[in-house]
Image (tube, helix red, strand yellow):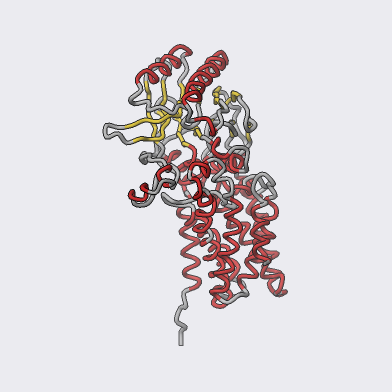
Amino acid sequence: MVTAFCAFALHLAFPRTGAWWVIPFALAAMFRIWAGLPLWAAALNGYVSGLVFFTLSFSWFGETAAALVGPLGFVIDLGPALGEALAFAFTALVASLAARRCSPLLAPLVTAAAFTSAEWMRSSGIVGVPFGQLGLPLIDSPLRPIAAFAGGYGLTFLVAAVAAYAGAAALTPRLRPAAAGAIVAALALTAAAWLLWPARSLAPPTLRVAAIQGNIAQAIKATDAARLLAAQRYAVMTEAVAPQHPAFIVWPETVILTDMTRDTSARAAFGALAKRIGIPIFVGTIVSDAQGRLYNASVVFDRTGNVEATIAKRQLVPFAEFLPAPEWLRAIPAVNEIGNFTQGHGPQIDPLTHAGVLICWESVFGDIAIDTVRAGATFLTVSTDDAWFGTTDGPAQHAQATTLRAVETGRWIVRAAATGISGIVAPDGTWRERSELATQTTIVGNIGDPVDTPYTHIGPQPIALALLAFVILALVPWPRRI
């Protein structure tokens, strides 16, 4: 099946292959085939193609977690793909419908808008899964400046539109001028975005910061020995970096697997560490409230050793950190392995450093980063535990999201990952510092002032909703005037 092969080709655009340039070719063939199929045949073809793409794209989800749920481990990879494939089915259905209801000049644009709006819909909400977005690999292409104006969805739409016109023109010669026009328009928009890009000229960064990558494998992380090792290793590495005088130090997500609210001795120890070196520390840990509810959080100790802020993760990973389903399902042994965290509220900013704190999964959601910047964050930190995914494609794709967030928001980002990839990303998307996977290392470098981007003011929702409205209006069978 040609479209299944195209779906495989789309997968190659992501790490580790990183062949972002295959995207327009794969989309062009898929869109053209879908447009020529009957409605429900197109939807079925699209769903199968989506299943191929998302199963491959999500294959790293269960790298460690699958072992926890035993015979149901395959669901961690296949389950999300079964739902996300509906986005391709929707696009295929629209492509077929547009070929019948819209003018040949308009139909490709409708298909591109459908693909982009479907990408937004599947990536939103408490069960949204933003991985596999085409904007992630495209942020490493020459189209990067577009993201400062239209975000990752703008990148997707621009390439999808060019691909849709190219696919239509392949079998319809009279559409070749339109395809050429789409290519010229894309080049012109990219050139204009580059010329007007706020991050094209950055002031030299002067604020020294640090991130600790302790490299404790997920397979042993929850053991008592590893908990003690984590506390000791991160303390030693933090003291070692103190002579370089960073303004603050970021630790990864949940490196301290103890309830910092109830374990007063642990809280005192890390407070004493911050006071001893005179540097604020962002500690990835767990906290609880008076009702005993647990939160995945970042606790910020100021230079006097006091807790300056406690920032709870607001976007939890569905079917991993919480169960978005009836609680009685926990009676099933495998399901009971799912975490039971409570959702935090945001956006949350550390009042001491003015850092907008994104914890792991949150960094893949562009709307969360935009909300945090709008609330006053002058830079962003990302604390994550990508140890779950070993040395698969997962950590690299997650790191790409950090590149995209930096360009979209115009903020410097300090990223601390338990086993990598850690680093410092500038508002132009360049990694000024970057670690390797599965290494024990410390990231030290400088960050600078933020730059204002148009996308910060626009955000993803207006763009996606406008594209969805365009699709609906284009397909409505308006009554003809007599």
The x and y percentages for residue 213 are 56, 27
Foreground: 136 or 419? 419
Which residue appears at 51% of the width and 35% of the height?
A: 384
Looking at the image, is 202 positioned above or below residue 144?
Answer: above
Which residue appears at 61% of the width and 48% of the height?
A: 193
Count the marks. 0
Foreground: 211 or 458? 211
The x and y percentages for residue 441 are 61, 24
Looking at the image, is 387 positioned above or below residue 142?
Answer: above
Which residue appears at 46% of the width and 14% of the height?
A: 278
Looking at the image, is 68 positioned above or below residue 480?
Answer: above
Where the N terminus falls, by quadrant?
Answer: bottom right
421 horizontally vs 332: left or right:
right
**The image quarter in which residue 351 lies:** top left
**The image quarter in which residue 158 lies:** bottom right
Foreground: 125 or 335? 335
The x and y percentages for residue 452 are 51, 39
Q: Is residue 183 visible in the rendered structure shown here?
A: no
The x and y percentages for residue 315 are 42, 43
240 horizontally vs 231: left or right:
right
**The image quarter in which residue 417 lies:** top right
Instruction: In the displayed orientation, state which residue is furthest to the left.
Output: 290
Q: Is residue 53 visible in the rendered structure shown here?
A: yes
Foreground: 206 or 101? 101
Instruction: In the displayed orientation, state which residue is furthest to the bottom.
Output: 482
